Image (cartoon, grey):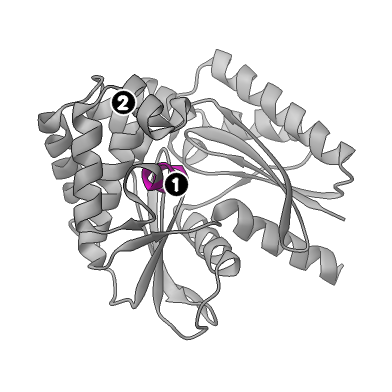
């Protein structure tokens, strides 16, 4: 039987259906919960109702597909919003299962698991997995064999950085430079161990691939930020076929990735996988063991 993961993040709510490690169906809604958290510190009733409706819709779709095991994971909105407990209660009620609030460390661990399971590689090679979400960013370091042994998170993501510092369209080089300084400040105590390779997952990385390719080194990320800083969103959508809903926060995502790449010292390779895939893998393992 397939398993289902509903992932409630700062930018999107996503449904992921998986059978024996393979994706069988997916859906998403761009709700921008992180923007509300950044502006108000809380999630307004209108957004709570909207997310509840989407969760109910996705849970119904999963059960109609034959899902018996479903996990609902909530990331930075549940951690950062003043009314996070209310959000969790509303989500659990809409899904019909108890939602799980992921710590930043757990989010990093699941992102690592999802990335390494979706991409072949040496079991002993030390790699980093980077995941920039809407409300936070994670770096996890470890091996395929042993899992992550070092995980760090910063409390900024593409949506929160955009709402805080990149509000114009286009944002301009001065604002992009100020945003980079803010991310560097948040990363000043983060010193990752040496790694042999870096994988990057998440919507920002996938969108940047359309601008500069799947290898995000220092030069590629600098080029992407320069393009995004000077080009209106409508032109980015038309010229690079970037998702219209994603492009608004893409400069913020690129700035965060550039700051993290500088600390890791290696290019970031855009790959499949992430938190949903990691959570689905664990759910399938529990299903097999039952």
N-terminal of the pair, mark 2 or mark 1, is 2
Q: Is the residue 280 above or below the residue 174 in the image?
A: below
Mark 2 surroundings: few (<14), some (14-19) or many (≥20) residues within 10 A: some
Relative side of 179 to 69, left or right: left
In this image, 273 relative to 149: left or right? right
| In this view, 254 is above or below 114 | above
Q: Quadrant of the C terminus?
A: bottom right
* Range shown magenta: 203-209
> Which residue lies at the image location 27% right of the left edge and 56% below the top edge?
260
From this viewpoint, which residue is outermost toward the front? Answer: 239
Mark 2 to mark 1 CA distance (whole Å): 21 Å
State the image coordinates of residue 204 (x, y, percent, origin top left).
40, 43
Query: Residue 16 at x, y = what percent?
Result: 68, 45
Image spot of residue 235 (x, y percent): 32, 23
* Contact between labelled residues 1 and 2, with CB atoms less than 8 Å apart: no
- The answer to whether residue 248 is seen in the rendering is no
In the displayed structure image, the side of residue 109 where residue 38 appears, left or right: left
215 vs 59, left or right, is: left
Name the residue that disc number 1 marks.
206
**Quick one: quadrant of the N terminus?**
bottom right
Label 2 or label 1, whichever lies nearer to me, is: 1
Q: Which mark is residue 163?
A: 2
């Amino acid at each position: 039987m397939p398993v289902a993961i509903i992932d409630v993040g700062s930018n999107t709510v996503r449904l992921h259906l998986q059978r024996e490690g393979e994706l069988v169906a997916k859906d998403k809604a761009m709700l921008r919960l992180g923007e509300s958290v950044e502006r108000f510190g809380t999630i307004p009733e209108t957004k709570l109702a909207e997310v509840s409706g989407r969760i109910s819709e996705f849970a119904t779709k999963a059960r109609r597909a034959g899902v018996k095991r479903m996990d609902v994971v909530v990331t930075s909105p549940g951690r950062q919003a003043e009314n996070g407990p209310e959000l969790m209660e509303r989500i659990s009620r809409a899904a019909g299962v108890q939602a799980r609030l992921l710590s930043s460390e757990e989010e990093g661990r699941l992102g690592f698991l999802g990335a390494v399971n979706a991409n072949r590689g040496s079991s002993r090679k030390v790699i980093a997995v980077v995941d920039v979400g809407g409300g936070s960013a994670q770096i996890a370091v470890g091996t395929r064999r042993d899992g992550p042994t070092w995980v760090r998170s910063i409390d900024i993501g593409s949506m929160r950085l955009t709402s805080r510092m990149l509000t114009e369209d286009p944002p301009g080089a001065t604002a992009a430079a100020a945003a980079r300084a803010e991310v560097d400040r948040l990363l000043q105590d983060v010193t990752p161990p040496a790694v042999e390779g870096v994988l990057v997952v998440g919507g920002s990385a996938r969108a940047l691939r359309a601008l500069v390719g799947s290898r995000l080194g220092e030069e590629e990320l600098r080029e992407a930020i320069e393009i995004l800083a000077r080009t209106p969103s409508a032109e980015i959508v038309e010229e690079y076929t970037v998702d219209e809903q994603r492009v608004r926060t893409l400069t913020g995502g690129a700035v965060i990735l550039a700051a993290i790449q500088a600390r890791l010292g290696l290019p970031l390779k855009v790959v499949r996988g992430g938190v949903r895939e990691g959570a689905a893998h664990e759910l399938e393992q529990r299903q097999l063991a039952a």
